[in-house]
Image (cartoon, grey):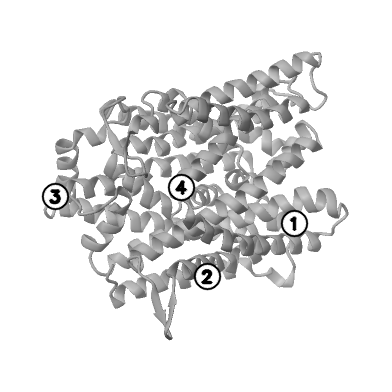
Amino acid sequence: MSFSTLDYCVLMAYILIIISVGLWVSRNKGGKKKNASEYFIADKSLKWWVIGTSLIASNISAEQFIAMSGSGFAIGMGIASYEFMAALTLIIVAVFFLPIFLKKGIYTMPEFLEQRYDKRVKTVMAIFWLVVFIFVNLASILYLGALTIKNVLFEGQSLLISGVVVDPLWIGIIALGLLAASFAIFGGLKAVAVTDVVQVVFLIGGGLVTTFVALKALGQGNAFDGFISLTRDHKDHFDMILTQGKTMIADGKGGMKDAYIDLPGISVLIGGMWIANLYYWGCNQFIIQRALAAKSIGEAQKGLAFAGFLKLLLPLIVVIPGIVAFALNADISKPDEAYPWLLSNIVPTGIKGLAFAALVAAIIGSVAGMLNSISTIFTMDIYKGFINKTASQNNLVLTGRISAGVALIIAFPVAIMLQNLDQAFQFIQEFTGFVSPGALAIFLLGFFWKKASANGALLAALGTFIFSVLFKFLTPSLPFMDRMGIVFLLCVLVMVVTAYIEGAKPSEKAITITPDMFKTTTKFKISAALIVIILTVIYTIWW
């Protein structure tokens, strides 16, 4: 992609702004050092708009821009169900999950599991999350982000520096990691959350401009006309619920497969996608940590509702461009090249820099959020729980910073190794899908069923892997989402049977649920109703 001087200036302006804001927030005010509460949960001071934007910045990476635009090119708006259903999930999490977490006053998800079950469950899940966050999530964000930069900025070519051939992939991985670390490691969650506000401005602003320019090109100078012709001339690409056998896509192995296997019709609305979304938005330290840092339950709920509205907007940024590329008959060899093609062939000088800054912002926000979550779990659940139970506040903050740095160093070579996988993103999604059904069962029954036991939780944690692997190999034609739904039900059954074998007595650590815990403000109710109405309209029009 040909960058002009103006494009480079726009990109450099973004980098300077994000570093400046991050360092400014990271400073020790009045020479006072940060304590653990300030570093890990921002001293419970985050406002709703910071929480909402930070959730989106952590959630969206360059892979969403590239992969979802690619799916938009190949499948259409059906892939947007991930974003639309997440908006509704955020409302459910805000009402039924957050009050329980905030009442417990926890720093981490493993800490909640110890309070509800026992230290064994906490330790198993803490170790699991650390392994997944470092070796799967952090490494994959760095790799896929750097790969995007290599393909978009350097057109997949190596660099010749002082006579030495250098792979831009290495440069991208290290540069992204260090840029995120410059404020995430020293400033803690508040620095991550405040810089996320800037990230989202670039992410959404740059993304919307790219979509507008693409629609304008399709409409021969009028973006609105472009959108109308897109929906009129390519109706099949606006089917939200796929029909089995109707849409064939590349399988990544040189053949073709039915898109239904990834988006199994009505199951998207009532099946396994709920498992993935409720786990991701409600039980995942990487995401929920922002809400744990809220000033109050009301502020946290408003933040999640705000994030819900932003999720409704995201398909316009990450899916529509792919459909436009399809309508423009983009000359590409695979769907994931759709977004880079738009940047190279449609987006004008100056706007390219802004669009690319949106990509970088998405990557940096995710890397910074992941580093903070890793340091929080290691410090509060492993270090303080087993290594130094009487650690001082300064010691905890120092440990958090060191653990984040070590995690980044480990992730660098792992990220490079991911290039040996044929389908790194699909591998990551599949691995996470093995875990989410059991983890969600453990949390939900821990919330709402007093007889759920620690032994049952441990068996569910083991069972989610066993059941998922068995279904994958014994029923390969079963859609991924349907498999998650079935495995979730089996894990719930395991916990129920275990409880009854043990005598089905209410646990001493059971959570006392009262109706007033789930009360919400009028403004939140109105926001929730608006999200439901918007989703109903979208699915009614493009069913």
Answer whether labels 1 and 3 touch (C-beta < 8 Å): no
Up the image or down, 165 lies above or below 267; here it is: below
Q: Which residue is mark 3?
A: 219
Q: Amino acid under label 2?
A: Ile
For numbered disc 3, what is the local secondary structure?
Answer: loop
Q: Residue furthest right?
A: 390
Q: Amino acid under label 1?
A: Ala
Of the residues tagged 2 and 4, which is closer to the observer? 4
Q: Which residue is mark 4?
A: 425
Identity of the residue drawn at 65% across and 28% down: 463
For numbered disc 2, what is the local secondary structure?
Answer: helix
For numbered disc 1, what is the local secondary structure?
Answer: helix
Of the residues tagged 4 and 1, which is closer to the observer? 4
Q: Quadrant of the C terminus?
A: top left
* N-terminal-most mark, 4 or 1: 1
Q: Amino acid under label 4?
A: Phe
